[in-house]
């Protein structure tokens, strides 16, 4: 794997982390699902970065930046609502 | 050539960290234990990916946008962990500070000697 191919392969292999996270989301408690969601969203940001670098598309890095910004807001909203109301 | 190999090494480390974290998330029993395994995937792996992109692209728009995303992840991860553990404590015990009398100070522990 030389150059950009390594980034694409790393993105594909990194997506395998979605399987354990999906199992926890489907079978675990609500808060365990929130923890799995947080890990999965971090993985999604990294996969977007790796794919943008692997396919040499600078414009697609903005998707990763946008998702990284939204990561904090979405996680906090879920955590806040799961405290008492859900 | 050497730059490509170095970037691949950092990518492999990042993938290993993420997969190990996901496996730990699956294996651990409760929320408090599972939350420990979010930190490597949210803090260490993005740094490794950022270093790999920096090695591959040099100082460019790609690497600067990558490090911007990594910066947001580094900032948000501790807040998310704190909010999650606070939600878990409130759901378990009714108050994130633990057991206290209503409106009062925490009861001091008795000396067992």
Image (tube, helix red, strand yellow):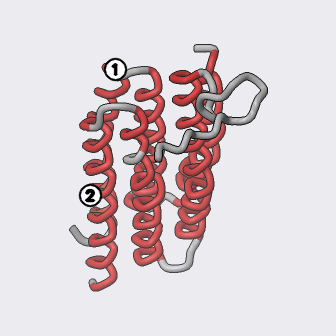
Q: Residue at x 59, y 52 (%)?
A: A65
Where is residue A85, by image quadrant? top right
Measuring from the top left, give residue A11's x and y in whole percent: 33, 52
What is the chain identity of the residue bearing mark 2? B
Where is residue B3, by image quadrant? bottom left
Measuring from the top left, give residue A78's x and y in whole percent: 59, 27
Residue A30 in view here: yes
Q: Tell me if residue B14 comes above or below residue B55 in the rendering.
A: above
Q: Tell me if residue A24 comes above or below residue A67 in the rendering.
A: above
Q: Considering the numbered disc 1 on the image, is that residue within a helix, a strand or a loop?
A: helix
Q: Considering the numbered disc 2 on the image, is that residue within a helix, a strand or a loop?
A: helix
Q: Using the image as rendered, state which of residue B79 and residue B17 is in the foreground.
A: B79
* Same chain shared by disc 1 and disc 2: no
Disc on res. B27: none
Q: Is residue A4 left or right of residue B112?
A: left
Q: Residue at x 43, y 41 (%)?
A: B35
Q: Using the image as rendered, state which of residue B98 and residue A30 is in the foreground.
A: B98
Q: Using the image as rendered, state which of residue B100 and residue A3 is in the foreground.
A: B100
* Residue at mark 2: B16
- Determine crowd level at label 1: few under 14, some 14-19, many 20+ residues with C-alpha closer than 10 A: few
Measuring from the top left, give residue A62's x and y in whole percent: 59, 52
Disc on res. A26: 1
Rendered-image quadrant of the N terminus of chain B: bottom left
Q: Residue at x 28, y 62 (%)?
A: A5
What is the chain identity of the residue bearing mark 1? A
Measuring from the top left, give residue A58's x and y in whole percent: 53, 60
Residue A82 in view here: no
């Amino acid at each position: 794997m030389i150059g950009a191919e390594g980034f694409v392969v790393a993105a594909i292999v990194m997506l395998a982390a979605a399987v354990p996270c999906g199992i926890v989301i489907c079978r675990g408690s609500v808060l365990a699902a929130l923890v799995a969601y947080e890990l999965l969203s971090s993985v999604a940001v990294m996969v977007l970065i790796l794919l943008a670098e692997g396919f040499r598309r600078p414009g697609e890095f903005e998707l990763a930046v946008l998702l990284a910004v939204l990561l904090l807001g979405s996680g906090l909203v879920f955590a806040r609502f799961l405290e008492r109301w859900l | 050539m050497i730059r490509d190999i170095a970037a691949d090494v950092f990518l492999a480390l990042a993938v290993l960290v993420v997969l190990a974290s996901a496996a730990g998330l699956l294996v651990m029993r409760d929320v408090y234990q599972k939350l420990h395994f979010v930190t490597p995937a949210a803090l260490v792996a993005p740094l490794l990916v950022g270093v790999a992109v920096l090695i591959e692209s040099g100082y460019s728009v790609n690497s600067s946008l990558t490090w911007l995303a990594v910066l947001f992840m580094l900032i948000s991860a501790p807040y998310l962990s704190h909010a999650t553990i606070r939600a878990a404590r409130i759901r378990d015990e009714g108050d994130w500070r633990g057991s206290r009398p209503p409106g009062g100070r925490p009861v001091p522990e008795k000396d067992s000697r």
